[in-house]
Amino acid sequence: MNCQEMKDTEDPRRLAAEICAADHQAFWHLAAARIKWLWETDTPAPSGRVSLGRAKRPGGLLRHFSGADFIITLREDTWADLTDGQRWALVRHELLHCGVKLNKAGQPMTAAGLPLPRGEGGEYDGEGVRLAYIVRKHEFEGFLAEIDATGRWTPEMDAAHRRWRQLMLPLSGEIDKDTGEVLPVSAADHLSVRILRGEEAMRRRSPRTGRGTARIAKRDRARAGG
Ligand SMILES: [Zn+2]
C-alpha cells in the first residue's frame, strides 16, 4: 500500500475541520483526537467495487509509532472523480467511523476508564480530554438483491428506510429548470440521487497529480461526437 500524508491545507482536512466545527453534537469527541489523513496512491485492484476511503483505529506498535487515534485513508484517484457534495459526504462518513466508547448508561468513557461528566451547559466537551476511542461500524449494510427479495427485514434496515423516505421529501421546494425535478435538500441526498440513477460522476482534476483531465477530454469528445 503506497500512501502519502496529507498536509493540513489539503481539501479533506479543511473539510473535516469545517464539518467538526459545524456539528458539535456529532463530533464533539474529536476535538482532541489525533487523526492522521493519508492519500492512498496505489492503482486500484481490478475488482468490482471501488473503495473511496476507510477509517482505522491503529493498535499496538502502529499506534505507538503513528501517535494517531485514527488513521483515515482516502483514495486519490476516486477523490478526483467526486463532486463537491460527494467529497463533503465522504469526509463526514469517515469521521462518523471515528467514535468514542460508551458505557452501559450511554456515557462516553475517558481513556482512563471513567465516564466523562457533562459540562455546565449539559453538553459534552472533548477539548483537552483523552477519550476511549473506537471505530464505529455501519449501522446498516446489505445487498440490493436482498432488498428486492426480502425488503427491510431488520430493525436497522427499517430505520434506514425511514430516513431515505424522509430525504426524498421535497423540503427545498426548488425545481431544477432543466429537468423539472425537485432539487436535493442535502449533499447526502445529492450523492444518493446520483448513485441511484447511475449517473457518471463529474470528472475532476486531482488536487495533486492532475489526473482526471484525460477522462474529461475523452468524455467531452464522446459527447461532441453524439
Ligand atoms: Zn464506512
Image (spheres, helix red, strand yellow):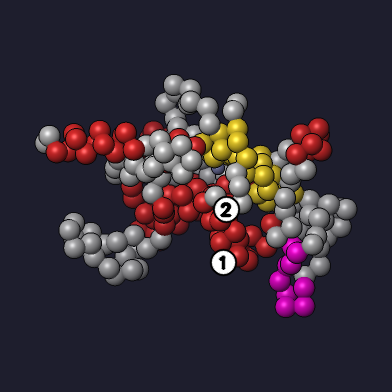
What range of the chain is rendered magenta? Answer: 119-127
Ligand 1 found in image quarter: top right
Amino acid bearing label 2: Thr
Residue 95, magenta (yes or no) = no
Depth check: 219 or 103 in front? Answer: 219
Amino acid bearing label 1: Ala
Q: Is residue 69 visible?
A: yes
Left or right of 197? Residue 96 is right
Residue at image x 54%, y 50%? Answer: 10
Quarter occupied by residue 31: bottom right
- Image quadrant holding the N terminus, namely top right
Left or right of 61? Residue 34 is left
Depth check: 108 or 37 in front? Answer: 37
Mark 2 and ligand 1: say if the CB distance to the nearest ligand atom is below 8 Å. Answer: no
Secondary structure character of the magenta stretch overall: loop
Asked if disc 2 and disc 1 are in contact, CB closer than 8 Å, the reply is no
Residue 148 position, x and y percent, is: 36, 37
- State the mark number for residue 204: none
Q: Earlier in the sequence, mark 2 or mark 1?
A: 2
Residue at image x 39%, y 42%? Answer: 205
Residue 63 position, x and y percent, is: 78, 38
In this view, the residue farthest toward the front is 209
Can you identify the residue that label 2 sits on? 9
Callout 2: few (<14), some (14-19), or many (20+) C-alpha neighbours within 10 Å?
few
- State the mark number for residue 22: 1
- Image quadrant holding the C terminus, namely top left
Left or right of 37? Residue 151 is left
Mark 2, secondary structure of its residue: loop
The mark closer to the camera, 2 or 1, is 2
Height in image: 96 above or below 203?
Answer: below
